[in-house]
Amino acid sequence: MTTPTKQDGGRATASAMVKAEDVHKSFGSLQVLKGIDLEVASGEVFCLIGPSGSGKSTFLRCINHLEKINAGRLYVDGDLVGYRQQGDRLHELRDHEVARKRRDIGMVFQRFNLFPHMTAVENIMEAPVQVKGMNKGAARERAAQLLERVGLADKAGSYPSQLSGGQQQRVAIARALAMDPKLMLFDEPTSALDPELVGDVLDVMRDLAETGMTMIVVTHEMGFAREVGDSLVFMDGGVVVESGRPRDVLTDPQHERTQSFLSKVL
Amino acid sequence: MSDDIDRTGGAPEDASPAKAPAAPAGQAGPQAIRAVPVRHYGRYVAAVVAIAVLVAIVYAFAQGKINWGAVPDYFFDHRILKGAGQTLLLTLLSMLIGVVGGVVLAIMRLSRNPVTSSIAWFYIWFFRGTPVLVQLFVWFNLGLVFEYINLGPIYKNYWSDFMTPFLTALLGLGLNEAAYMAEICRAGLLSVDEGQTEAAHALGMSHGKTLRRIVIPQAMRVIVPPTGNEVINMLKTTSLVSAVQYYELLRYAQDIGQTSGAPVEMLFLAAAWYLVMTSVLSIGQYYIERYYARGSSRSLPPTPWQRLRANLLSLGRPKGALG
Ligand SMILES: Nc1ncnc2c1ncn2[C@@H]1O[C@H](COP(=O)(O)OP(=O)(O)O)[C@@H](O)[C@H]1O
Ligand SMILES: [Mg+2]
């Protein structure tokens, strides 16, 4: 098994991997994010909870610039997302510059989004070969290691349609890890799974957290948040309502909205 | 999703015979069902009627004043073979232009750039909105507009020499086809889940790579079947290009008909050749469809042989059912 080596080891410790300052996002007239401020430290497992429609997915998608923010500032590893600052002016990044930044950010989706016309191992090899120009032999070897790490060494040749939901999600995690990201975004990775398959995926995520990966996890799995999470944020209506250590927020929520949400999901 | 796929151990647990009182004790496995299958009398009636009609038609044509002997005499005439070759060549090259043009137009049409998408919209509007025969004549007569073709130091010639009948036919058919293929490709590209593009982008793939590696291969499952239809249509539409002096199968057949005094017979001969060629092309389509169906959960489309066998079997008693 391989452990992703932290490439930014030389960097000042406790630097923020993600920093959001007053982030706003709207779709047309619908305001979805209304000023998000938060900081995710390097190596931290950061959990994001909140009712459906509160803007959690939108916020994650802003982090790798799948959505453009309308106001505020968003930094990943010290760099502005989607823009370059020159003097006091912002310049939009070109598509290929955005693509280059996305290499370092892995994303795992609720609906897996594996490529259905490729086998598990081909799914994992695709980005290293096509984006990084890695040679196929090395990529295949690496993919095999990653499959073993997520417990699916025997499924290398299976197409996504031949895998269960839990297996597909673990392949999707391996696919994201193949790019050696410094940050992993999880958008409700277990919400589309049958209950008995959730555990396998959470186990893989727990292992990943132990390697020191910075992870932002949108989840309804409060057990996971409490056990693995370093910090937790409760979002509602496009703002951060409450944040703190998972144990504190989950057992002793201060805010009334947090209390009513937790009473529904716990 | 389908979690039942991961059944470990293919052997089904032996169904307990307890709830089947009729099952003789000590027999391993469940008792096979023995029942009289439903008889499909309607199928027999339909088959008999169809054969009768077919026989009547064949008889009528055999009785007619048609010299059937002329058909085999000329079937492999070198002019016919050459014509069939030209028809096939024109079909394949026009479809190549059509498919490549169609993909490009579809991508332009779906692009966020308003200029490119308007150009594509206009192109499709124009070429789909005018008859292909008219377009062929326009290409043929373009010498009235342009006297020379002048590509600087690379190429310079009189338009009438440059625009051979072959090029006229090829451009006329190919550019028209691109407009139709554009709509087919657009439907294909739109059929691919947006999550696919998103996942590819999230991995750092560029727009181009995402299209080429992720979206287009999946769109092909939707694109191939109607494209097969277009190929067959194109094969038949090539018979129009004799209007611009290009010699293909029908034109050669008609010429032979004039000189040999068997004009109608030669039309039948041409029809037979078109049928042969379309049949061969549809077989090719099955294999292309099977290729792009890989990874799909539904079973692969059957090969022509499998279909033929299945059809023949289903006519009679379903033999395999008890096996
Ligand atoms: N591309 C989009 N266009 C328009 N509205 C959107 C889009 N994406 C999300 N929304 C809206 O933004 C709101 C927040 O969505 P989302 O971020 O998915 O919430 P969550 O993930 O917390 O459930 C919802 O009301 C949703 O309808
Ligand atoms: Mg969501």
Image (spheres, rainbow, N blue to C red):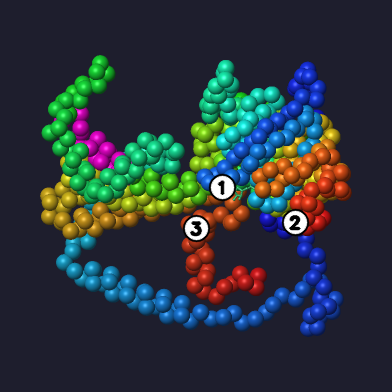
The residue that label 2 is drawn on is A194
**Crowd class of label 2 (few under 14; some 14 to 19; many from 20; radius 10 Å):** some
The residue that label 1 is drawn on is A30
Using residue B8 as the reference point, say whether residue B78 is left or right of it: left
To which chain does the residue with label 1 belong? A
Using residue B233 as the reference point, say whether residue B103 is left or right of it: right
Disc 2 marks which amino acid?
Asp
Determine the residue positioned at 51% across, 79% down: B40
Which image quarter is the C terminus of chain B in?
A: bottom right
- The image shows residue A21, relative to residue B229, as above or below, that is above
CA gap between label 1 and label 2 equals: 33 Å
Determine the residue positioned at 78% across, 60% down: B11
- The image shows residue B49, relative to residue B123, as above or below, that is below
Instruction: Identify the main secondary structure in magenta.
Output: helix
**What span is in magenta?**
B160-178
How far across and down, in percent of the image, does residue A226 sit? 85, 45
